[in-house]
Image (spheres, grey):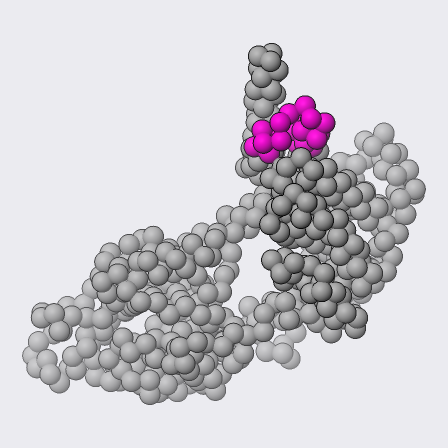
């Protein structure tokens, strides 16, 4: 077969439930209707993002009428270095094709969505386990002949279609296949399923690539919901007027988050707490890094997960819409949503006033009830009774500042901010490393307890000795980094224990030598 008659090889890397098989059929049917020899195969993946679902298509760009008696032999599996077009519905999946050697600079066009659906390793990490999207994008740009990267998921939501229709529009506009865009649109119509919405998504993807600069949907920062306090704009203007540009956008997001989490007063407290950090950043000549990192972690710490927040999340309309979309249910189709909960004494004490909660916790600890008493519940949050249980808990939000969990969290936050301020007088790097230790504290229940315990160990055995000038600032910053990294490696704390013991030995040797 001559070089001009080489098949066009297309590799589709998709996620389960996104219609990768339908997309493959559309392309195959468009090619067949246009008179081109075509063949496709599929390799199903597994659940929970531990494997990919891939589809492979070969199209010979020579019509059957020109082949006469000849019959092309098309491959059943993709070959490394032999792919002309890679289609990916998610950025990590595009990265996987690069890692697998399928993307080459001499021939491969990568068409991928920049949206992320996190893999399991990213979700279960103790800290921020997300892969660097910039590195993924750079890897694609380095290894591909050309790339078309844009948020297909956002365009799909805007047009009311599935992402596979947007992907079809993108590949139709790329010009890499021998069929005109009209052939792809005809394949959607011939399929006869959800024609109107699929055509809308197809046209959105087509227009995005043809325009060269695809429009983005409204970002998460603009999706504040109807419950956003009316005075939020004033706080945002205050941030613009008082905070340096390097941290301004991040702090505005923190203000929005905390206003939605609690109220405007709480968001104002966030800004008040950042004011001395800004001064410390300037005094330590940290270039805004200390302010940015503290602002990011402070927003997360102040929006801690308590039973009130969990109840809010369970009945959040956005969550219900997402689940309905994932199940592909029409708006008028009812469904049940069962929540499995196992609250214990500590969770129940979260919403009590501190004096009463402390007495109950002390009594439960003496009697050995803390780890033994848990109330297992299975609640249908779509039923009237189930919804009302979560609704009543969520309505306790105004009570939160009087609760025991709130008092504990605020005391811990103030202690953490105080250590950052102290450290900034010694070293900007030391202060940043202490701010980063907030990564250890997240979630609720056992996850929160383990993180808090690990933070306490690092504070007692590393941070306090540094702040008391028993260790040089630079050595202390390195030690904090090592201890924090070890704590994030495993949830049980074994790596942290070994790291702290090693740090103690090194400190003892140094003191003996002096």
Q: Using the rendered view, name the quadrant where residue 419 is placed.
A: top right
Q: Nearer the viewer, residue 158 or 77?
A: 158
Q: Nearer the viewer, residue 50 or 251?
A: 251
**Quarter of the N terminus within the rendering:** bottom left
- Image-based side of 227 in relation to 169, left or right: right
- Bounds of the magenta segment: 458-478
The reply to whether residue 351 is visible in this rendering is yes
- Image-based side of 110 in relation to 113, left or right: left
The reply to whether residue 350 is visible in this rendering is no
**Quarter of the C terminus within the rendering:** top right
Image x and y of residue 272, in percent: 78, 54
Image x and y of residue 240, in percent: 69, 65
The residue shown at (41%, 81%) is 211
Assign the magenta stretch its main secondary structure. helix
Image x and y of residue 241, in percent: 71, 65
Q: Is residue 451 above or below residue 213?
A: above
Q: Is residue 304 magenta?
A: no
Q: Using the rendered view, name the quadrant where residue 141 is placed.
A: bottom left
Q: Is residue 195 above or below residue 40?
A: below
Q: Nearer the viewer, residue 182 or 186?
A: 182
Q: Is residue 467 magenta?
A: yes
The extreme top residue here reads: 512
The residue shown at (12%, 70%) is 3
The residue shown at (29%, 85%) is 180
- Image-based side of 218 in relation to 213, left or right: right
Q: Using the rendered view, name the quadrant where residue 284 is placed.
A: top right
- Image-based side of 252 in relation to 366, left or right: left
């Amino acid at each position: 077969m001559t070089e001009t008659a080489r098949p066009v090889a297309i590799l589709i890397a998709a996620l389960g439930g996104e219609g990768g098989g339908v997309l493959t059929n559309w392309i195959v049917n468009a090619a067949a209707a246009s008179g081109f020899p075509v063949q496709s195969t599929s390799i199903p993946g597994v659940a929970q993002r531990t494997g990919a679902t891939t589809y492979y298509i070969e199209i010979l760009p020579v019509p059957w009428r020109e082949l006469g008696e000849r019959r092309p032999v098309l491959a059943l599996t993709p070959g490394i270095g032999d792919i002309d077009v890679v289609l990916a519905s998610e950025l990590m999946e595009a990265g996987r094709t690069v890692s697998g050697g399928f993307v080459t600079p001499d021939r491969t066009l990568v068409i991928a969505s920049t949206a992320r659906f996190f893999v399991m390793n990213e979700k279960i990490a103790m800290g921020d386990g997300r892969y660097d999207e910039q590195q993924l994008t750079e890897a694609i740009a380095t290894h591909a002949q050309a790339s078309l990267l844009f948020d297909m998921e956002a365009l799909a939501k805007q047009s009311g279609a599935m992402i596979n229709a947007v992907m079809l529009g993108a590949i139709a506009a790329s010009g890499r296949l021998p069929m005109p865009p009209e052939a792809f649109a005809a394949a959607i119509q011939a399929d006869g399923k959800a024609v109107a919405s699929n055509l809308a998504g197809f046209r959105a993807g087509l227009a995005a690539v043809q325009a060269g600069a695809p429009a983005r949907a409204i970002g998460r920062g603009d999706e504040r919901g109807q419950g956003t306090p009316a005075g939020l704009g004033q706080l945002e203007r205050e941030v613009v007027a008082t905070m340096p540009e390097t941290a301004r956008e991040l702090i505005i997001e923190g203000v929005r988050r905390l206003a939605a989490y609690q109220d405007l007063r709480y968001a104002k407290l966030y800004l008040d707490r950042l004011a001395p950090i800004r001064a410390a950043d300037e005094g330590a000549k940290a270039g805004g890094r200390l302010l940015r990192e503290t602002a990011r972690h402070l927003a997360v710490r102040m929006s801690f997960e308590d039973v009130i927040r969990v109840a809010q999340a369970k009945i959040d309309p956005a969550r219900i819409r997402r689940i309905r979309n994932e199940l592909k249910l029409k708006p008028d189709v009812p469904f049940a949503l069962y929540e499995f909960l196992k609250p214990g004494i500590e969770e129940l004490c979260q919403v009590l006033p501190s004096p009463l909660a402390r007495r109950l916790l002390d009594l439960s600890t003496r009697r050995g009830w803390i780890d033994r008493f848990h109330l297992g519940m299975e609640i249908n949050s779509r039923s009237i009774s189930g919804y009302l249980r979560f609704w009543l808990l969520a309505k306790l939000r105004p009570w939160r500042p009087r609760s025991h969990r709130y008092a504990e969290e605020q005391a811990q936050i103030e202690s953490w901010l105080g250590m950052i301020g102290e450290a900034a007088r010694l070293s900007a790097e030391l202060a940043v490393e202490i701010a980063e230790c907030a990564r250890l504290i997240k979630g609720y229940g056992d996850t929160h307890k383990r993180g808090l315990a690990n933070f306490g160990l690092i504070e007692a055995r590393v941070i306090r000795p540094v702040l008391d000038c028993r260790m040089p600032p630079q050595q202390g910053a390195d030690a904090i980094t090592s201890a924090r990294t070890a704590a994030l490696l495993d949830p049980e704390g074994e790596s942290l224990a070994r790291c702290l013991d090693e740090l103690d030995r090194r400190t003892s040797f140094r003191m003996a030598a002096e």
